[in-house]
Amino acid sequence: MSWTDERPPWLPPLPSPNRGRIRIVVGMTMVVACMLGILVVAFLGETLSMYTWWPLATGLALLMSGLLSRRRMP
């Protein structure tokens, strides 16, 4: 048995490696879907509704919060 097998009690617990992953995936999905929808509408020459920006803003907020939660130290 090596001295590296046990974690010293004075060390803080390690954060989860999956912290914020769900928010990042959902945020990226919303941003990509909105951008593709905006490109399709622009290609067809239609008028873009202002309600299209709400899912985009929500996706960006989820993406930013997921990325910032990964950066935060416990």
Image: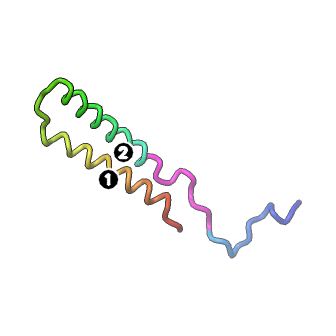
Which residue occupies 24% across, 43% down? 55
Say what amino acid the circle numbered 2 marks: Gly
Magenta-span inclusion, residue 18: yes
- The residue under label 2 is 27
Say what amino acid the circle numbered 1 marks: Ala
Spot the residue most to the top.
44
Task: From the top left corner, tell me how far across and down residue 10 is, in percent.
Answer: 69, 76
- Asked if the residue at tag 1 contacts the one at tag 2, i.e. Cβ–Cβ closer than 8 Å, the answer is yes
Q: Secondary structure at mark 1?
A: helix
Left or right of 32, for residue 54: left
Secondary structure mainly formed by the magenta segment? loop
Vertical relation: 43 (above or below) 50: above
- The residue under label 1 is 61
Circle 1 residues within 10 Å: few <14, some 14–19, many ≥20: some
Number of marks in picture: 2
Q: Camera-side residue: 5 or 70?
A: 70
What residue range appears in magenta? Answer: 13-22
Q: Which colour scheme appears in the figure?
A: rainbow
Q: Name the image quarter holding residue 68.
A: bottom left
Task: From the top left corner, tell me how far across and down residue 44 is, in percent.
Answer: 17, 23
Q: Which quarter of the figure is the N terminus placed in?
A: bottom right
